[in-house]
Amino acid sequence: MTGNGLGLIESSCNLARWLQPSMVIIEDVDLIAEERTHTTSGGHALMFELLNQMDGLNDDADVLFLLTTNRPEVLEPALASRPGRIDQAYEVPLPDAECRKRLFDLYADGMSVELEHLDTYIRRTAGASGAFISELMRKAALFAAPDGDPIVVKDQHLDEAMHELVIVGGTLTKSLLGFKEIGFSLGDNPH
């Protein structure tokens, strides 16, 4: 569940019980389970419903809750710190070089790509999230589009996309696409 679906916690959990073994995935749980001191009283209803549903499972119920967040520090202690509600937590780190290479391959799927210096782009995206690499490839394809049909993404298109995302897009774009300081500067020559 995410977005408007978060209002369907009770019915989703009822369906999960009926279909068990099952899994209920709540993406960005911090949107409904932010620490009570940070939210207004109107924002508590969904959180209390989630807590009730998680507590209301019988011991023999085979329903797993998977909660995601980018902001674990703001989660309500009644959810995050109470034994039995959250049994395990995993941090998903930013992708390493090998993972970034696989992400470039993944997001290039279905495109014509002719890169001479892929290793340079893998290095330049150190600290970047998967979302950043996805947007980088999408923008590179947009820059390649005027060059002809079929569209072929080349090094120069990735350079233009990187410049637009990092330099033109600035801090807000970097924050939205999730990366720490990546390995790119104005004087960086990829070739």
Image (spheres, helix red, strand yellow):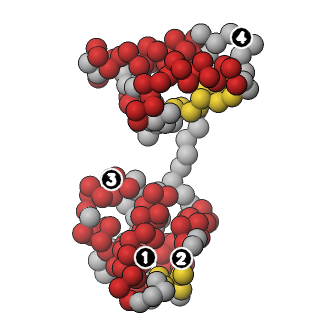
- Work out which quarter of the rendered image holds the C terminus and state it: bottom left
Residues under labels 4 and 1: Cα distance?
A: 51 Å
Residues at circles 1 and 2 in contact by the CB criterion of under 8 Å: yes
Look at label 3 and name its amino acid: Ser
Residues at circles 4 and 2 in contact by the CB criterion of under 8 Å: no
Label 1 Cα crowd, 10 Å radius (few <14 / some 14-19 / many 20+): many
Instruction: Classify mark 4: helix, strand or loop.
Output: loop
Residues under labels 2 and 3: Cα distance?
A: 27 Å
The residue that label 4 is drawn on is: 59
Along the line of sight, which residue is nearer the eye, 13 or 37? 13
Coordinates of residue 28 in the picture (x, y in percent): 44, 36
Residues under labels 1 and 2: Cα distance?
A: 8 Å
Q: Earlier in the sequence, mark 4 or mark 2?
A: 4
Look at label 2 and name its amino acid: Met
Q: Earlier in the sequence, mark 4 or mark 3?
A: 4
Q: In the image, is residue 25 above or below residue 157?
A: above
Residues at circles 4 and 1 in contact by the CB criterion of under 8 Å: no
Instruction: Classify mark 3: helix, strand or loop.
Output: helix
Residues under labels 4 and 2: Cα distance?
A: 49 Å
The answer to whether residue 7 is visible is yes
The residue that label 3 is drawn on is: 175
Coordinates of residue 156 in the picture (x, y in percent): 40, 85
Coordinates of residue 186 in the picture (x, y in percent): 29, 77
Instruction: Classify mark 1: helix, strand or loop.
Output: helix
The residue that label 1 is drawn on is: 141
Look at label 1 and name its amino acid: Ala
Circle 4 or circle 3, nearest the eye: 4
Label 2 Cα crowd, 10 Å radius (few <14 / some 14-19 / many 20+): some
Q: Earlier in the sequence, mark 1 or mark 2?
A: 2
In the image, 167: left or right of 57?
left
In the rendered structure, find residue 111 and report the number of the disc placed on it: 2
